[in-house]
Image (tube, rainbow, N blue to C red):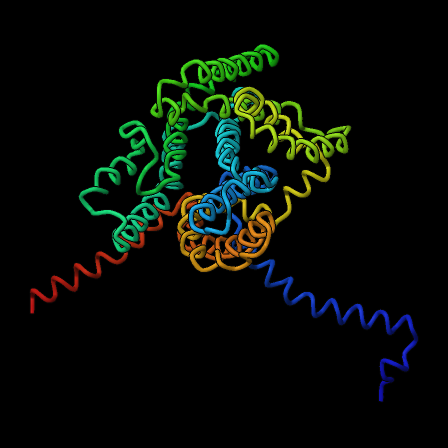
Amino acid sequence: MPPTLEEWPATNRARVLRESRQRWLTVPARYFDQLLRHLSRETTSGRFVPQMDGLRFIAIGMVVLFHLNSYLMAKAPFYERDAAARDWLCRSALVGFHGVELFFVISGFILALPFAAHRLTGAPAVNLRKYYLRRLTRLEPPYVITILLLMLVGLWFSTGSAPDLGPHLAASLFYLHNLIYGRPSTVLGVAWSLEIEVQFYVLVPALTLLFAIRSSGLRRFFIVLFAGLAIIANARLGQLGMRFALSIAGYLQFFLVGFLLADVFLLEWKTPSRHPILWDCVALLGWPALMISLQSEMQTRWLFPLLVFILYCAAFQGRWTSRALSHRFVTAIGGMCYSIYLVHYAVISAVGRFSRFIGAVLPNPLYLLLQFAMVGAAILVLCGAYFCVLERPCMRRDWPQKLWKNVGNILPSKQIETKASFAD
């Protein structure tokens, strides 16, 4: 009969307890690992920059916090608007919509990379047909399905009539709502930024000609110059109205910041920074400073692009910052930010009508944190499922070919059955 645990030496007892604990921990860890694999986006191009997904995590967090705070201000009578504006967390939430500009910088970086790599490192040239086809097959199915579903939900709850929403739906489907109506879509409010993204996609081949300038200093000078001119144009021409503000002209400087990051990323960051801790300090102090500066319109206009560039550099160059932003849980959420962005406000509206009464006696910051935890958990669950069912399959480059092949395999059998029925 083997000795009991109490009869073993102390060293053996410690080893047995440790191994037993590890066996118990491996079960949830294994399921968690499988969950993260299902929630992680697919990259068929082989270009996966985890820090960018980490920055997407920050950007979508800001946007969700902003919309949640706005919802609570409108729907929770005990969440006082004036009092909320005096609290540090609530003030930060009020400027959370600037997370959209963080997405624009990321788009500028990601879409500039293949063009810049061709010009600067001799990588293969970008096939424009494949480039635009990839944008179409990757982004359009989730967008179209989401906007149609939300329109049906709006009609079901009588928030509008089909004749009234029809023109807005058509304009939104063709990314023309900002231009035609001069305001965000009434069918999918967040589509205003996606229309700007589409305008950028169209201009990318022309804008990336900047990378044809061989001199690094001169090339970066022109990128910074054009970004500065875009900022000045916004300051001078902002009075032209919402059609100007809701266009690529109103946000070009952020896409160009992404260009500058791509340039530096390809040529300067092939080796780790010699001062990673310094960059970690920049990130630690810079993100709170950014949220404070965004509360000033003047600082937002002139300093925001510069601060974003510095903080994105810290995301790559800082040791602990890079590790934190590259964590699998963070990159998984950041990787499904498109699904979250499309449907998060619908989830806030559905869940918030029940959760908003919980914690009503708490101070505003604690109440907002509690709501963010509860509604955020619902967003992760529902948007995660939405991502797995709808968006993630569209990340595979060959999904249209596979779909067409499956349809082709089905159609002949149906035609044979039809002919047989006529013959009978």
How far from the left and from the top, in percent, is residue 50?
A: 60, 40
229 up-or-down from 273: above or below: above
How far from the left and from the top, in percent, is residue 368?
A: 55, 49
Q: Quadrant of the C terminus?
A: bottom left
Task: Tell me if residue 46 can be seen.
Answer: no
Q: Is residue 208 left or right of residue 166?
A: right
325 up-or-down from 283: above or below: below
How far from the left and from the top, in percent, is residue 118?
A: 52, 23
User: Which quadrant of the view contains residue 178?
Assistant: top left
Q: Residue furthest bottom?
A: 1
Residue drawn at point x = 29 percent, y = 38 percent: 173
Q: Quadrant of the N terminus?
A: bottom right
Residue drawn at point x = 41 percent, y = 52 percent: 349
Residue drawn at point x = 61 percent, y = 26 percent: 307
User: Which quadrant of the view contains residue 322?
Assistant: top right
Q: Is residue 169 left or right of residue 387?
A: left
Task: Tell me if residue 166 can be seen.
Answer: yes
200 up-or-down from 138: above or below: above
Q: Is residue 413 left or right of residue 149?
A: left
